[in-house]
Image (cartoon, grey):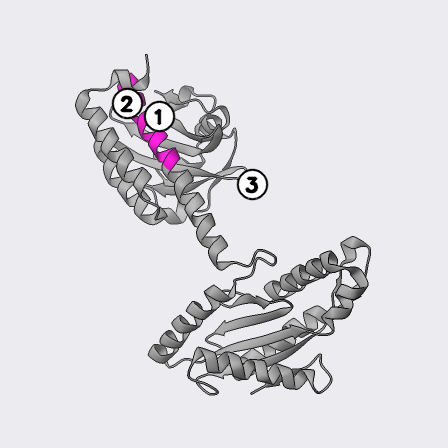
Amino acid sequence: MSSKDLLTKDQLLTCLELGKDLTSELDGDQLLSIFLEKLSLLLPAQSWSMLLLDEETQELRFEVSVDLDPKVVDTIRLPLGQGVAGQVALTQKPMIVPDVSQSAHFHGKVDLLSGKATRSLICVPLVFGGRSLGVIEVVNPRELGGEALALLSVVADYAAIAVENTRRYQRIQEMAVHDNLTGLYNTRFLYQALANQIERARETSRAFSLIFMDLDNFKRVVDSYGHLNGSRAIQEAAGTIRSCLRDPAFGVAYGGDEFVVVLPDCDKVEALAKAHEIRDGMARTLYLAEQGFQVPLSASFGVATFPDDASTRQGLLALADQAMFRVKGSGKNGIRAV
């Protein structure tokens, strides 16, 4: 007998409506709001949570929860196999625990941190294409029988599809604004971000700055070590840039061996200091070491600031570019402001 065979017609229709909502929504935040509203009607309980699996760390984290302090659960990570949730994610099999004190798998970490008291629970896996995406866990549900498990299992099937859809959509969105080689943002993102920065700077009367930089004598690197190693060197240079930046600052692969760094809320003095930090980071690094080489790289830097130097994104980029070319013409491996 399948899960659907245990449900009434009204319950199946409610599940179908929820499934349509979940699988048609690509915005993750909106998705969870829909899920929260509908699930509380389907399966009354003290609290419930959706935990998603981090593919890199293989740990479950709380994505959304009801009646639990987000500040508490946001810090919790459950390895696969730990606790009821970890077991369900590992085995991909649902679990009903009528009395957690009698369960060998129950882990009281959440109760300890939250001050809640779990007496019983139902946990079902989110599985898509044979992969565990996470679990749905219902704490102290009003009903613990097969009907409750059937409801939750049907919902979990739809939720797994929805989670996978939103992840794929997010990956596509990220690919659209990131450079494939370096992982930095691309120029498509840059132009829109600069428009937003200008609008924000005008509203707040705060400056922001750009660093335009170009690797020095990079053709020699390509000629000496080949195009493949040239691409690797650009990747590694991008890594140096990234290591020097903290949110909300970001780097952009502008083209070839050129980069732009955007520094929100930074005046010219702060931007010059950041350019020196990147320049010093490059000077301390020998590139292509994993390929058996020790290649030094340097760059020429131009700095421009809004609104002191220009009032448009085109003007700001052009002036930073011109400042960089003046460095190129006077010996390279230097920094110049407009």
Span shown in magenta: 145-161
Residue at mark 1: 122
Q: Give the image location of residue 273, x and y in percent.
A: 60, 78
Residue 158 lies in the magenta-colored region:
yes
Say which label, 2 or 3, has the lower sequence index: 3
Q: Are marks 1 and 3 in contact (CB under 8 Å)?
A: no
Name the element at disc 2. helix
The residue sitting at 44% across, 72% down in the picture is 194
Question: Is 332 displayed left or right of 100 in the figure?
Answer: right
Where, by quadrant of the figure, is residue 287 drawn? bottom right
Residue at mark 3: 57
Q: Are marks 1 and 2 in contact (CB under 8 Å)?
A: yes
Residue at mark 2: 148
Q: Nearer the viewer, residue 102 or 139?
A: 139
Q: Are marks 2 and 3 in contact (CB under 8 Å)?
A: no
Question: Is 254 displayed left or right of 293 in the figure?
Answer: left
Determine the CA span between mark 2 and mark 3.
31 Å
